[in-house]
Amino acid sequence: MDGGAQYNPRTVEEVFRDFKGRRAGMVKALTTDVEEFYQQCDPEKENLCLYGFPNEQWEVNLPAEEVPPELPEPALGINFARDGMQAKDWLSLVAVHSDAWLLAVAFYFGARFGFDKADRKRLFNMINDLPTIFEIVTGTSKKLSKEKSSVSNHSSSKSKSNSKGGKNSKGAHAKDEDEGLDEEDEEEHGDTLCGACGENYASDEFWICCDVCERWFHGKCVKITPARAEHIKQYKCPSCSNKRARP
């Protein structure tokens, strides 16, 4: 259940990279790939688990058969609750369990390879600097709240002065050519996080804002190019598009 790779991270940095890779895969399942993930979690199937792999891929599969398993196992039977809850509540529940599993795997490696108190603290601090999957899926992190406030206060200037997609009739805008404005924008929106991968805003990357949930995304994460964005009057992210399509 580990993507076919026999990889055992042994240092704090290696465990953190493993954590980030698995996390990125699970975030992808619950955001940009949410329709595919939803379909794979058929309640008629047996107990299913959501796995994240170090190569940033995800998989819905049966739990490991060996007892005890090689690694801690994710929450069992996530598919059974799918049709008994609102989609957003179910995704939030899966996100919470995914966060718990990621921590379990990271600190399993820490225990296995003898991390001392200082190593464990450093690993936790590195992990804690990232938003949780739950915070990304629900948009409830403090940083995302700050981002929304920033969006509402500066939407007019951002639509003209940065590389993000704006909430306006022309959709997304290309990167500003004025370096001074870029530096100001980087400082002003440095806490803005991508709703798909959870990484911070950078002025040299193209971003686009969802007109429904007002979360920001790397263009590359939602497969939107600047040229395509110019023709989008109202952009809806994959999660919001999926909610509208499902009864």
Image (cartoon, rainbow, N blue to C red):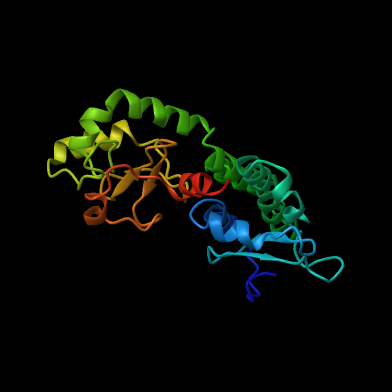
Q: Position of residue 96 (x, y in %)?
A: 67, 43
- Residue 119 makes an appearance in the image: yes
User: What residue is at 20 percent from the left and 46 percent from the top?
Assistant: 175
User: What residue is at 44 percent from the left and 36 percent from the top?
Assistant: 213
Q: Where is residue 156 in the image (x, y as percent from the top left)?
A: 23, 28
Please tell me whether residue 121 is drawn above or below residue 66 in the rendered image.
above
User: What residue is at 42 percent from the left and 37 percent from the top?
Assistant: 212
Q: Position of residue 22 (x, y in %)?
A: 59, 59
The quadrant where residue 186 appears:
top left
Quadrant location, the C terminus: top right
- Residue 131 makes an appearance in the image: no
16 on left or right of 228: right
The quadrant where residue 168 appears:
top left
Q: Nearer the viewer, residue 146 or 138?
A: 138
Residue furthest front in the image: 247
Q: Where is residue 133 in the image (x, y as percent from the top left)?
A: 58, 45
139 on left or right of 176: right
Q: Which of 236 and 134 is in front in this view?
A: 236
Q: Nearer the viewer, residue 24 or 9?
A: 24
User: What residue is at 21 percent from the left and 42 percent from the top?
Assistant: 170
Quadrant location, the N terminus: bottom right
Residue furthest right in the image: 67
Q: Which of 52 and 128 is in front in this view?
A: 52
Marks counted in the figure total 0
